Image: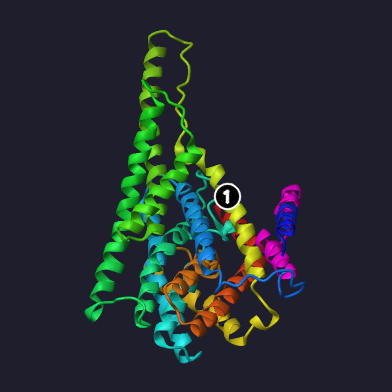
């Protein structure tokens, strides 16, 4: 398709979405379904105006998905409620670790014993489709930094973490296929890909987020009182943290998410301390007879200042990537093998892994059911797919994994997109009724 038509297509779609945003909010479907429908229409399924080949364009797709996931992880991290509480984070941590491992194991077993795939390919497939997605799960995400909804928090926090916690299983699958060094008895995989890369990524993110929060807070206050460009600072944090993570071989997705979390948590902690000090000062002034003492004003924060810009970038990336998904699918892409895999993931593997992962927690059963269903798959799965392709997958296996991953993501967009608004609305109405 000529560049002029691409500009017209994307520009026209953005105009329509922008002009009808209030109508779309009331519609029963998500905007992702609309983007997918347009992609299917102009792609080889209907008009065949363009065809995007993920195998030939894997390097480009890797960069596009990588950037989209990183921006989304940062946005999710800065919207995490504060202050940090392990009791509240326990459920998403279990989902991102225990439930992640169970999902990979179940998909690997299904792929090996039912679909007849090699064990290594099954593990790799499980790692590709197991992570839930922070990019496409807009309607089940934390909406703003002050959002206290427990279900949205759990799903957003899980998606933020498991886009990084899936990486060790990707490397295990590649190792079983002979494309990555696992070491004797898997020691390299356990110590380097598991322990070091995971803990190192979390530590890097926490240190970077805390350091930037304190630096920005200091520069904005007296005696410096600098004006800062929050958008650039946020993007800079993403770039530096991810670049360092790649250089020291730790998981960059985890590093960026926890950098955003630490940035937000630290800024809010500093703001609370400053607010308490200013309130105390104002109370003293009033006690001394100064009835016109002004309420204290605190400087803005990098986390909130950069969030709006990141959300715009996230929406733009969703438009482009979902159009490309629609442009990859032919009518015969819908094999029963891929459809059965998707249904097994949505109906069996995801709910079972959530049930086991949350055993022993006080999570209400209704929330467990909702969490089990809304494990949205999307851009993260595409990234892991093209990462594996770039690692040297044989072409027949790569084509097989492309087909199955694209059908899983497409069905997730459709099934979760159709059900999210009615189910979430019913969930919140029942919660509101029980609170009265």
- 198 versus 409 height, above or below: above
Please state the horizontal and vertical placement of residue 397, each as a whole percent of the image: 49, 83
- 365 versus 276 height, above or below: below
Q: In this view of the protein, which residue sits in the foreground, 428 or 183? A: 183
Please state the total of marks drawn on the protein image.
1
Q: In this view, does 409 lie to the left or right of 233?
A: right
Element type at marker 1?
helix
Q: In this view of the protein, which residue sits in the foreground, 103 or 329? A: 329
Q: In this view, does 327 lie to the left or right of 401?
A: right
Please state the horizontal and vertical placement of residue 395, each as a whole percent of the image: 50, 82
Instruction: State which region is magenta.
Output: 14-42
Residue 244 visible in this rendered orientation of the protein: yes
**The residue positioned farthest toward the front in the image shown:** 2
List the residue tagged with mark 1.
Answer: 313
Q: Residue at x 41, y 60 (%)?
A: 161
Please state the horizontal and vertical placement of residue 373, each as a whole percent of the image: 55, 70
Q: Which residue is drawn at 39% across and 13% down?
A: 285
Q: Is residue 1 left or right of residue 219?
A: right
Residue 423 visible in this rendered orientation of the protein: no
Q: In which quarter of the image is residue 164?
A: bottom left
Q: Which residue is drawn at 40% across and 86% down?
A: 119
């Amino acid at each position: 398709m000529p560049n002029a038509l691409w500009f017209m297509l994307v520009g026209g779609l953005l105009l329509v979405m922008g002009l009808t945003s209030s109508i779309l909010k009331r519609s029963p479907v998500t905007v992702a379904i609309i983007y997918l429908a347009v992609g299917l229409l102009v792609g080889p399924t209907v008009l065949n105006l363009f065809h995007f080949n993920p195998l030939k364009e894997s390097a480009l797709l890797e960069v596009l998905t990588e950037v989209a996931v990183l921006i989304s992880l940062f946005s999710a991290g800065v919207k995490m409620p504060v202050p940090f509480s392990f009791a509240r984070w326990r459920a998403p941590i279990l989902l991102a670790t225990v439930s992640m491992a169970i999902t990979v194991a179940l998909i690997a077993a299904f792929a090996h014993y039912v679909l007849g795939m090699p064990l290594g390919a099954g593990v790799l497939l499980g790692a590709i489709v197991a992570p839930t997605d922070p990019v496409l799960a807009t309607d089940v995400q934390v909406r703003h930094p002050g959002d206290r909804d427990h279900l949205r928090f759990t799903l957003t926090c899980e998606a933020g973490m498991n886009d990084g916690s899936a990486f060790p299983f990707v490397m295990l699958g590649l190792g079983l296929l002979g494309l990555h060094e696992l070491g004797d008895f898997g020691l390299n995989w356990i110590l380097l890909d598991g322990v070091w890369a995971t803990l190192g990524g979390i530590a890097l993110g926490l240190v970077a987020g805390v350091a930037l929060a304190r630096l920005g807070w200091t520069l904005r206050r007296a005696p410096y009182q600098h004006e800062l460009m929050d958008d650039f600072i946020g993007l800079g944090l993403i770039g530096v943290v991810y670049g360092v993570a790649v250089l020291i071989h730790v998981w960059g997705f985890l590093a960026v998410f926890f950098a955003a979390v630490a940035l937000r948590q630290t800024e809010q902690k500093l703001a609370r301390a400053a607010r308490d000090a200013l309130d105390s000062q104002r109370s003293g002034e009033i006690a001394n007879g100064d009835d016109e003492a002004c309420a204290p004003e605190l400087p803005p924060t990098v986390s909130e200042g950069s969030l709006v810009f990141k959300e715009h970038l996230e929406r733009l990336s969703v438009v482009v990537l979902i159009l490309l998904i629609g442009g990859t699918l032919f009518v015969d892409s819908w094999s029963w093998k891929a459809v059965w895999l998707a249904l097994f993931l949505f109906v069996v593997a995801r709910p079972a892994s959530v049930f086991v992962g949350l055993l022993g927690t006080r999570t209400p059963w209704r929330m467990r059911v909702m969490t089990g269903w809304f494990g949205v798959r999307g851009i993260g799965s595409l990234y892991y797919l093209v990462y594996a392709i770039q690692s040297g997958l044989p072409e027949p296996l790569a084509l097989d994994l492309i087909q199955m991953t694209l059908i899983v993501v497409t069905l997730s967009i459709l099934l979760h997109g159709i059900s999210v608004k009615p189910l979430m609305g019913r969930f919140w109405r029942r919660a509101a009724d029980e609170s009265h």
